[in-house]
Amino acid sequence: MTFNNTIALFFAASMWQFAAAQKIDSTYAEKLGYPKGARVLILHVDDAGMSYDSNEGAINSITKGVATSVSVMMPCPWVPGFVHYMKAHPGMDAGLHLTLTSEWGDYRWGPLAGKTNVPGLVDTEGAMWSNVADVVAHASADEVDKEIRAQLERARIMGFEPTHLDSHMGTLFASPEFLKRYIGLGIENHIPVMLPGGADVLIQAEMNAPAEQIEQLRALGKMTWAAGLPVLDDLHNVSYDWKIPEAISGDDKKLQAFKTAKYIEAIKSLQPGVTMMIMHSTATTDMFPHISGSGAVRRGDMLAMMDPVFKKALQDEGIILTTWRELKLKRDKVK
């Protein structure tokens, strides 16, 4: 289940009552001090720590390309390798990709809080559930809270202070109680949380969401902003669904051209405000097919981020690239 599906599930099941959103008179980008009408973009790589290939793809996309941010799946086996790299190369904008699912058939992980402490997060193989619906069906909000706190604790034990929090597979958006714990963790620790709470033009189109759902997102955004955290104006999360033609999946040059063209089309659709664009850059090796069949999609993301053609397009479009760290610094200065 994708992020868009799970956030839709949240709104369909939500029993929260939100005040109707007022007319938007300025973007969160403007409130943070960016020029009126500016299109500000976080190019964000998900899934660091998931595998060696994931780590290399994220590093390549940021150090050799134009990606600006990344988030780490703390329960996964290759987290130490990524965190050790970050400590040796300070300054990377890295958050926690809070993880409550383990979706691959032969490559799996369990909760950091301990299986006996969060039994509702554990499936019949002793790993996390493979899909969002099972997490919602079996796990309590208290168990979710224990696990996301354990993931933050492990990061800090390793000397990794995250610049932001977001949600693997959108699981934390699939239940109103989960979402409360997610936003609450960010507010309590003054860590920004991924939350599209502005005009939400892109995500509304991607979700085919009715206006009342977008009003609820905006109300959450206002609450999060009032708590002193930055808020996104929009979220772009469709790159994983861009189908790669079979004929080009094994040809890096053609794969790069295809994915670059898709990303250029995407940035042209950006509205004024701060948008986060999600990708899954991966430097696939011969081992990756044993984890997932999504290698071409993920490799294409990395190649696009490293493509000078995409870098030039960002410049031609006047896109301002940013990070979660920069957003927080700007938010801290706003009265």
Image (tube, rainbow, N blue to C red):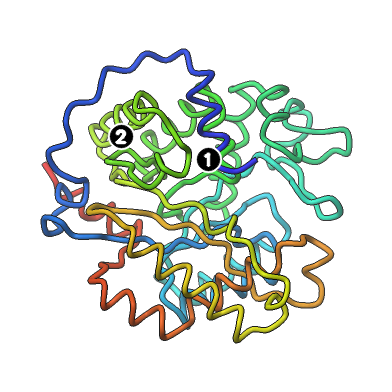
Residue 69 picture quarter: bottom left
Tell me if 321 is positioned left or right of 60 in this view.
left
Q: Is label 2 in a helix, a strand or a loop?
A: helix
Q: Is label 1 in a helix, a strand or a loop?
A: helix
- Asked if residue 242 is positioned above or below residue 24 in the image, the reply reads below
Nearest to the observer: residue 166 or residue 306: 306
Query: Of marks 2 and 1, which one's residue comes earlier in the chain?
Result: 1
- Asked if residue 2 is positioned above or below residue 219 in the image, the reply reads below
Question: Could you give the CA–CA distance between mark 2 and mark 1, rounded to whole angstroms?
Answer: 17 Å
Looking at the rendered image, the quarter that the N terminus falls into is top right
Q: Position of residue 102 (x, y in %)?
A: 74, 45
Residue 25 picture quarter: top left
Q: Amino acid at mark 1?
A: Asn
Tell me if 63 is positioned left or right of 157 in this view.
left
Q: Which residue is tagged 1? A: 4
Say which of marks 2 and 1 sits in front. Answer: 1
Rendered residue at 25%/38% (across/down): 228
Q: Position of residue 156 (x, y in %)?
A: 52, 51
Q: Amino acid at mark 2?
A: Gly
- Asked if residue 115 is positioned above or below residue 59 in the image, the reply reads above
Mark 1 burial class by Cα count in 10 Å: few <14, some 14-19, many 20+: many
**What label does residue 287 carry, if any?**
none
Nearest to the observer: residue 119 or residue 302: 302
Tell me if 275 is positioned left or right of 59 in this view.
left
Rendered residue at 23%/71% (across/down): 318
Q: Which residue is tagged 2? A: 221
Mark 2 burial class by Cα count in 10 Å: few <14, some 14-19, many 20+: many
Rendered residue at 68%/78% (across/down): 248
Rendered residue at 70%/54% (across/down): 76
